[in-house]
Image: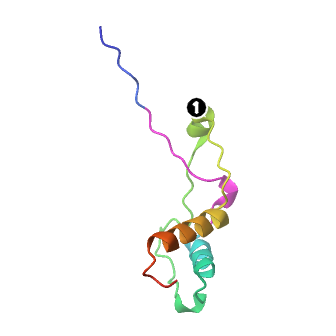
Amino acid sequence: MFLLAKKFVYNVAGMPEWESSIEVYSDLVLKTVGIDGSIVTYEDAEPFTTNIKTIDCSKAVKDLKHDPKVTPEEGIMRTVEWMKSIYTDINI
């Protein structure tokens, strides 16, 4: 007798209050790595572009007790520090 396990797909993301535009996150990355944001030029969005993409994590919250604790600021800082430790040849 074979038992078939059900397969599920979950959206896993941060908190809804952390949703923001790509410009906000780009500026946060630039600030974290110490690069002046004036080097970036943002173009106007094309018609019908979704500026902020909302992910519904309610299934992951309900089934997996998903409860993100690391803020985007902290996560970006940790990622930059990790990348510096891995890519030691790059001067950021």
Our reading of the magenta stretch's main secondary structure is loop
Res. 4 image quadrant: top left
Locate residue 51, reporting x and y percent.
55, 68
User: The residue tagged with tag 1: helix, strand or loop?
Assistant: helix
Residue drawn at (66%, 44%), measured in percent from left and top? 67
- Inspect the image, locate mark 1, and give the three-letter code of the amino acid beneath it: Asp
Q: Position of residue 23 (x, y in %)?
A: 58, 76
Relative to 27, say whether 72 is above or below: above
- Most extreme residue toward the left is 1
Q: Which corner quadrant holds the N terminus?
A: top left
Q: Name the residue located 55 percent from the left edge and 51 percent from the top edge.
A: 55
Could you say which is closer to the camera, residue 7 or residue 90?
A: 90
Q: Quadrant of residue 87?
A: bottom left
Q: Which residues are magenta?
A: 8-20
Dividing the picture into quadrants, the one containing residue 75 is bottom right
- Please name the residue that numbered disc 1 is placed on: 63
Please report the residue visible at 45 percent of the width from the left and 82 percent of the height from the top.
Answer: 90
Q: Dot 1: within a 10 Å radius of its alpha carbon, few (fewer than 14), some, or many (20 or more) residues?
A: few
Q: Is residue 12 magenta?
A: yes
Looking at the image, residue 18 lies above or below residue 37: above
Q: Is residue 45 above or below residue 78?
A: below
Give residue 25's position: percent from left, percent from top: 59, 72
Residue furthest top as drawn: 1
Please tell me which residue lies in front, 59 or 74: 74
